[in-house]
Amino acid sequence: AGAQKGRVYELLRSSSRLKLFSERAVRLQRLLEQLDSWDFDVFQAAETTGGFPLFLVAYNLMLVHNVIAPFGLNETVVRKALHTIEAGYLRNPYHNSIHAADVTQTMCYFISKPFLLPYVTALEKLASIIAAAIHDYAHPGVNNNFHVAARLDLAIVYNDRAVLENFHVSSFFQLMRRPDDNMFATMDADMQKQIRQLIISMVLATDMAVHFDEVAKFKSKLIQVRRDMGRDDVGPSTPSSAARDDDGRKRSTASIAEKPRKKSVGNVASAKEAPARRTSFIKTAADTDLFLRMALHTADVSNPAKPIYLAKKWTEMVVEEFYAQGDRERDLGLPISAFMDRNTGNVPKLQLGFIDFIVKPLFEQWASVMDEVAEVCLPQLLDVRAYWSREQEAGARKGSVGSADAGSPASRSARADPGSPASKLRIPPAAAVKEEDSMDAASEGSEH
Ligand SMILES: [Zn+2]
């Protein structure tokens, strides 16, 4: 009887395990069907895989974009390398493998769109996926500024320039020297050289220090592109999008349904029908390189353009990492970086500055040539902006935003602004975001 009881127990246990397994398989299947969606929930990917979102996303995107077989890559080595890369990401509050998976998925969203897809070679697709997957490899959780200010080893190794970006890409190519992990081993020397150049170029362009120079190049290139596409060159347009409710999912659907009006619908249609004309703007390797660099950088700062429930989660994570850096700066007697002092933190202001000076200008540029960005991403970004704007107003009404205990003067950075102009002057929050603070956020706080 005892043995029978044992068998029944075993049976029950294995069937519940099977059920668990099949539920997980169904969830994974559903997730993978969303892999090309702007609303892809990378946190669910992390949960469902038990902590391997980067492997799930990168490996499946490699399959989707068919970049394994054409280069004769060894699938076992590819899988091993992706696991090694994921394991190399520390468990930072923000710069972890979920962020890497998010940027990889978002990067592929851009290169999968008709504006780019026909002009991106298989090698460039492979380079894009790997560059995104490794772009923050082994990130220590403190930014370039901290490395330089605290004179950490990496700052000395890389002469204070693009310290972390150099470190990420260099560490990855160190990894590629190990036969077990060298997924490029089967490629010929010329291809290995090309993919190395592409990956280095893309990852170094994620350095916030080159943001404004890169955007300037991108802008002038897009003027030419819009001319070639036959779009009136009125510059990027900003569709208006009113916030409707606090449910990110509902609003995201509404945003997609509510398409912004385009200025030259006829011309857009003809540009779509005449792909041959469009090749005129992506004809050199340098052109593609610029678009891929901008796509990766945009993916890297895309958090506020995602559905609100994702955008808020990313904000919590990045703020936790910023405050941890601020604590270390305080302990070392260094000036505390803007928005990194937990005693004076102002999250809505940080987000509004980041959106207005970094993220929105980038998405507006893409929206002027990429319909999906105009119809899906940019309206979403404006919804998220409206949310932070309401949060800031609510904080100002309570008189709590920015006027929390500022701490002793010595405990905060000379550049940190503890007083919120909005709370004192009652001026609109958008105008209250000072450019100086936003630049600080761009160069110090918002490094991804
Ligand atoms: Zn990043």
Image: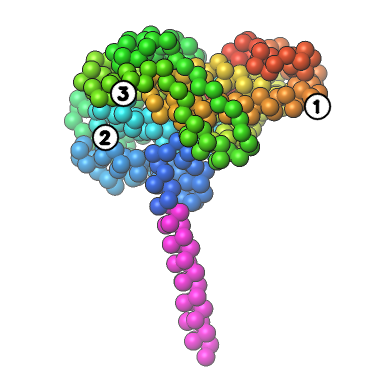
Q: Which residue is mark 2?
A: 184
Residue 17 on image: x %, y %? 47, 67
Which residue, as the protein is rendered here, is positioned at the far front? 266
Q: Give whichever of discs 3 and 1 has the lower sequence position.
A: 3
Q: Residues within 10 Å of mark 2 (few under 14, many from 20)?
A: many
Given the image, on which type of amino acid does mark 1 rest? Lys
Given the image, on which type of amino acid does mark 2 rest? Phe
For the magenta stretch, what is the residue range? Answer: 1-28
Left/right of residue 185 with respect to residue 371 in the rendered view = left
Distance CA(mark 3)–CA(mark 1): 50 Å
Q: Which residue is mark 3?
A: 269
SS state under label 2: loop
Q: Quadrant of residue 330?
A: top right
Q: Residue at x 38, y 24 (%)?
A: 370
Q: Residues within 10 Å of mark 1 (few under 14, many from 20)?
A: few
Q: Give whichever of discs 2 and 3 has the lower sequence position.
A: 2
Distance CA(mark 2)–CA(mark 3): 40 Å
Front-lying residue, 312 or 68 = 312
Residue 57 on image: x %, y %? 40, 42
Q: Residue at x 35, y 44 (%)?
A: 60
In front: mark 1 or mark 2?
1
SS state under label 1: helix
Q: Which residue is mark 1?
A: 398
Given the image, on which type of amino acid does mark 3 rest? Ala
Left/right of residue 259 with respect to residue 427 in the rendered view = left
Q: Quadrant of residue 216?
A: top left
